[in-house]
Image (spheres, rainbow, N blue to C red):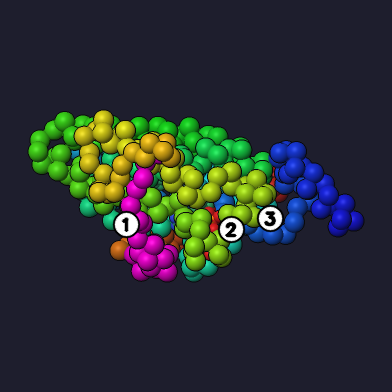
Amino acid sequence: QRDAVGEDFDALIAADQRIEPRDAMPEKYRETLIRQIAQHAHSEIIGMQPEGNWITRAPSLRRKAILIAKVQDEAGHGLYLYSAAETLGVDRAELLDRLHDGRQKYSSIFNYPTLTWADCGAIGWLVDGAAIMNQVPLCRCSYGPYARAMIRVCKEESFHQRQGFEILWTLMRGTPEQQAMAQDAADRWWWPALAMFGPPDTGEAAKGGHTEQSMAWGIKRFSNDDLRQKFVDMMVPQADKLGIVLPDPELRWNEERGHYDFGEIDWDEFWRVLRGDGACNAERIAHRRRAHEDGAWVREAANAYAAKHASTVTA
Ligand code: FAQ
């Protein structure tokens, strides 16, 4: 029986077909997807906080309306992704517990502070830009519900990236102070955005990594370093258009490779942030826990309504 299950799964993966919730799958495949999808969902809802910080201070009504819509989209992406994770037989309440007590991660990037309005531009341009680069290939992920969720998410992320670019574009055509603010935001977000793609493919860090297995299963379609390189290649011309100087003296076109070379990422900083020692880790989790506790009455009311509705239907 188990062998037959394994053969069906292997055949579907080999034929590049989708695995659906009712299909048999190896336990490790299920666990990997729960980890990745949950981490992705947690990133979306924790990721509401850095920009949420600027909703009351957005510089115009138009900027405020756009920012509220963007932050709402992030909440929606979280809900979509928790639903996709639930198809693997895990409850979202359990996943939130794992986030709140630190058993599951969220993206390193959201542990950095949003100090000025330009940071909302830098997040849209760089963080959503990196998110799209990483997520477009996930639309072809072997797990059906995750792949399908990614299609809509990517469409919305494209809008997010454009709005971030447009914030910076406007600032770069403003006063010298506004230009300096945009440049400063890009200086602070560039390196953390490169680290978002995860540890390098080679060396010590790669040893405990998931890439090889996840690529064999068709969950990941590209390695972390390949996506990072694609991102750098995409962003350099955009920075030129904006008039922003990326904070890397080693950044230059390599004719032979047909790619941009770039400097060394501070991986010590990355691991430190993952261990909880970034500028905002404690604040982000404390805020999330408080929001969860404050929302308890909504969950209770929804459950009471669902129970009442169920008894009405059966009566
Ligand atoms: N942060 O072997 P790998 C967004 C961990 S976009 C924290 O390479 P994997 C949109 C990794 O979990 C951000 N941890 O792992 C938005 C593993 O730890 P473990 C979210 C990281 O899974 C924009 C260890 O390092 N996007 O939210 C990070 O094969 C603006 C070894 O790494 C996604 O989650 C990191 N950056 O590849 C929202 C996309 N990188 O479990 C608001 C889906 C690695 O062994 C505002 N996820 N780690 O203890 C993925 O594509 C993958 O999970 C990777 C990591 C590529 C992130």
Label 3, label 1: how far apart the Cα atoms are: 32 Å
What amino acid is found at the position of numbered circle 2 in the picture?
A: His
- Residue 209 visible here: yes
User: Which residue is denoted by mark 2 in the rendering?
Assistant: 210
Q: Quick check: 136 above or below 109?
A: above
Q: Is mark 3 within 8 Å of ligand 1?
A: no
Which percent across, then down, holds residue 97?
53, 64
Question: Badge 1: how crowded within 10 Å, few (<14), some, or many (20+)?
Answer: some
Residue type at the position of mark 1: Tyr
Task: Kindly identify the residue that appears in the image at 26 percent across and 44 percent down.
Answer: 246
- Image quarter (top left, top right, bottom left or bottom right) of the C terminus: top right
Disc 1 is placed on an element classified as loop
Label 3 or label 2, whichever lies nearer to me, is: 2
State the residue at coordinates (55%, 45%). Answer: 222
Q: Is residue 137 left or right of residue 275?
A: right
Most foreground residue, 247 or 37: 247
Q: Identify the residue at the far right of this view.
A: 1
In this view, the residue farthest toward the left is: 176
- Sequence-wise, the earlier of marks 3 and 1 is 3
Residue 27 drawn at (x, y percent): 72, 59
Q: Is residue 219 left or right of residue 195?
A: right
In reply to whether residue 270 is colored magenta, the answer given is yes
Residue wearing tag 3: 29
